[in-house]
Image (spheres, helix red, strand yellow):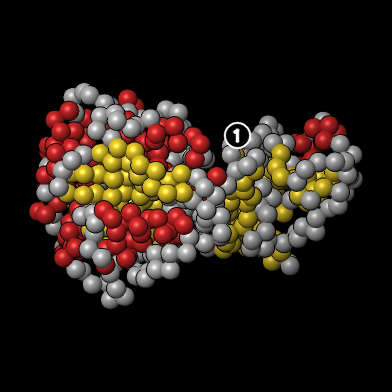
Amino acid sequence: MLKFILKLILIFPMITSAQDLDFLKSLDQQYDSYREKSINHRRFKHSDIKPLLTSLEDKNFFTVKKAGVSAKKKEIYLIGWGEGPIKIFLWSQMHGDEPTATMALLDIFNFLKTEDSFNDFRKLIHDKLSIYFMPMVNPDGAEIYQRRNIFEIDINRDAVRQQTPEGELLMHIFDSLKADFGFNLHDQSTRYSVGNSSKPATLSFLASTVDYEKSVSPVREDAIKLISGIYKNISHFIPGHIAKYSDDFEPRAFGDNFQKLGTRTILIESGGYKDDPEKQLIRRMNFLSLLYAFKSIAEETYKNEDPAVYEKIPFNEKFIMDLILRNLRYKNAGHEYTIDIGINREEENYSEAKDFYYKSAVEDVGDLSVFYGYDEYDLKGMEITIGKTYPQPFSSLTEIEKLDFSELYKEGYTNVVLTGKVSPGFTKLPVNIFYKTAEDEPLNLKLGKKANFIIKKDDEIKFVLVNGFVLDPLKPEFKSGNALIVK
């Protein structure tokens, strides 16, 4: 009975204030009027947000300060709003490829400068709070959509040495503000699950630790209580999709050091959600989470939250893959096996990192019954073979475009060879192109190798996988993926 009760508490952790929930529901209903519509994808640059930040100056109590510059001399701004005694400091995108919270901060700026039915709330937080925002701490990394800064240093491992200009600046601003609360805003892998479940960890929270023993200081306890309140309320919008980030102590990280230095520090990690590749729903959840946090801090209701709620939040686990093919028959070395195949896709930057293409690989093979996929296919009774390379080379892309790909698949081919000129990268043609020479593709399943397969039932082709994307063999075309051009 006790286990059943604990399970119910975890699923329905929440006796929430009706007033708080009504506030968030109203905010959610009006969100589109605050959303910064000029930013609608993840790969925006410093030049995209700079005019949005500088335009805030002198508007509805905003202050805009050029706090410093990055290694490549891009401006890093500190935006101030509010005149209250409680100081809050939020910083985003210290990792250049973690942009979700930056988008949410732009939405919050629009909310703060609007006059509408939330004016009483704005007055409350304006009078109680002084809020400082540092969006895009790592503009050089954002420019090429990479985690680290231009020196290949992880800024979030530079809190002690402060060898990067961005890390030194962040610590300087922290020291000058002496904030009561800090929000450390990141993105995490989309493959994190909420515990051992099929649900992606869309948001993960952490009250940063202060030592290896994971001690709960009074400052950390306040952060824990605040997260408890956020968790209870935001779970109504994404039930089952909130986890707790690993609480291992990292002595080089800013969040851990800020907590240790007396600022109640909350880490928010934006993960994944099905059919939200540009993280627009997750951006919205950041917006709601942060505005609720401001409300709770201004009204001091976080002080009444139960820390036990935080302790019951499941940790992040890695039980999710991009694609799982289940119950396939596979023949090799005179044996026949029933296997599942897990496939993950990684993004490769191109066009000055304004866009990307996918490279896929086999992540795991065997009994994957404890794992889950964003997409899954139960292929019981079907047989899988490895896609082969067509032996006759082609001299131009035009020749390849004219191919009958359905016939090509029937012969077991997912790859062709091109002797003409073409740049390595990707193609929207439903076949991989090896440039000049055929790649030595193994015809056995290999972990880490490209996911190119023919799937048949009773000698009839049912599915084709090219670069880890499932295609209809009769009408092969990519909806969101690509094949590869390999030099």
Up/down of 455 relative to 216, above or below = above
- Whether residue 256 appears in this view of the structure is yes
Q: Nearer the viewer, residue 62 or 137?
A: 62
Query: Which residue is drawn at the image coordinates 67% and 59% (left, top)?
Result: 449
Query: Which residue is drawn at the image coordinates 18% and 33% (left, top)?
Result: 122
Up/down of 149 relative to 397, above or below = below
Q: How many marks?
A: 1
Please state the horizontal and vertical placement of residue 401, each as a whole percent of the image. Answer: 79, 32
Query: Which residue is drawn at the image coordinates 24% and 49% (left, top)?
Result: 88
Please state the horizontal and vertical placement of residue 487, each as a whole percent of the image. Answer: 79, 51
Q: Nearer the viewer, residue 157 or 239?
A: 157
Q: Which residue is mark 1?
A: 479
Dot 1: within a 10 Å radius of its alpha carbon, few (fewer than 14), some, or many (20 or more) residues? few
Q: Nearer the viewer, residue 61 or 114?
A: 61
Q: Nearer the viewer, residue 204 or 297?
A: 297
Please state the horizontal and vertical placement of residue 334, each as a whole percent of the image. Answer: 73, 67
Disc 1 is placed on an element classified as loop
